[in-house]
Image: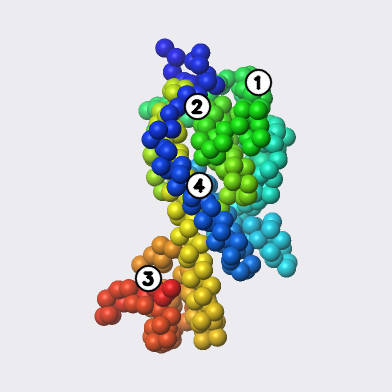
Amino acid sequence: MLRYNWEKEDWLHFTYSLREAEDELFLIAEKTGKVSGILNALPKNTMTDTIVEMIVLEAIKTSEIEGEYLSRKDVMSSIRNNLGLNQQLEKVKDKQAEGVSELLIDVRNTFQEPLSREKLFAWHKMLLKKERDITVGAWRSHTEPMQIVSGAMGKQTIHFEAPPSDRVPEEMEKFIAWFNKTGPGGSEEIKKAPLRAAIAHLYFESIHPFEDGNGRIGRAIAEKALSQGIGRPVLMSLSKTIEAKKNTYYAALEKAQRSNEITPWVNYFIRTVLEAQIAAEELIDFTLKKTRFFDRFNDMLNERQSKAIRRMLEEGPTGFKGGMTASKYVSLTKTSKATATRDLQYLLSINAFIQSGSAAGRSTSYQVNL
């Protein structure tokens, strides 16, 4: 019995129906246009802050999907270094943060270029520059099967097995040709960018051409396809949306890798793009509110208060988990309990904070008033 898509006679002849996805595709196009308009109207600093925040989010979440938890500070520093926004380069301790940040900036800067083997090798080197136990910047070549497994040793479940390593160079040559032919102006152009991104991600993940880093590079390829389709670097975090329902993502991918009729996968992926676009709108709105907040209150805040508020706002539109309490304020600002209580009451009195917990004792907590 042929278990996987690449083993079947119809491999590379993906079939699908867009009937269920038509409304989502329309909404994505509408919201993409809206985001472009909002971006162009933003003050330059606010636009830059929004773009940086989105790349930081994508870097952190694409790594979390693979079980890697990066330092937000190092990701932010690396991205700002790569974008030339720091007057002096900031030191980045976390090399994984540096690698994924470098990859995402390059995806953004080169989205219009055709895909090539050399570009994929360069991305792999960026992402895994410090790995010593695997081959970096080359297709996998080991003879043992490339399997996606879960479970304890001896009780493992095999979710997918990729083509043998000796097939990878030919399969990737075909993939790269397909990607370039289906891009804007190509001989087999797929005009709906979310559809092309869905197929590209599934196709790449099914070959699984590298020893490690396939998931992160596969999501970068999906981002490149989306960016080419709209004619500008995409402003959304696909990985944030995927990571929020990671088990759904893996289940949809596993099912899609059993057949070349991929309608369920296409529907799943297009819904994910739409959710990511909605979240991007919320982040842009949050960034605008944050800018207005500091325009209003910056001259009224001391260094301690400003530090605490900026840390709270790092959590994004969802807010600071559990709110700011006196004990958290003491820990964050290294001040006394009495000073913390006085600062919090002051921030409440000027309407910089709103109360989010009980008004009594230790349960009193606050959120930034945006």
The CA distance from mark 2 to mark 3 is 43 Å
Q: List x then y, in percent, for residue 138.
A: 68, 31
Q: Nearer the viewer, mark 2 or mark 4?
A: 4
Describe the element under mark 1 as helix, strand or loop: helix
Of the numbered discs in the image, which one, if any, rests on residue 170?
1
Of the numbered discs in the image, which one, if any, rests on residue 82?
none
Instruction: Tell me if 226 is positioned left or right of 159 in this view.
Output: right
* Marks 2 and 4, the one that precedes in the sequence: 4
Q: Nearer the viewer, mark 1 or mark 3?
A: 1
Describe the element under mark 4 as helix, strand or loop: helix
The CA distance from mark 1 to mark 4 is 35 Å
* Marks 1 and 3, the one that precedes in the sequence: 1
Say which residue label 2 marks.
Answer: 147
Say which residue label 4 marks.
Answer: 29
* Marks 2 and 1, the one that precedes in the sequence: 2
Say which residue label 3 marks.
Answer: 323
Write the residue at 36% across / 77% down. Answer: 354
> Looking at the image, which is closer to me, 38 or 61?
38
Q: List x then y, in percent, for residue 226.
A: 57, 43
* Marks 2 and 3, the one that precedes in the sequence: 2
Other-residue count near label 3 (Cα within 10 Å), few / some / many at <14 / 14–19 / ≥20: some
Other-residue count near label 4 (Cα within 10 Å), few / some / many at <14 / 14–19 / ≥20: some
Q: Which kind of residue does numbered mark 4 sit on? A: Ala
The CA distance from mark 2 to mark 1 is 19 Å
User: Is 323 drawn above or below residue 83 in the view shown?
Assistant: below
User: Is 262 drawn above or below residue 336 in the view shown?
Assistant: above
Write the residue at 63% across / 46% down. Answer: 231
- Image quarter of the N terminus: top left
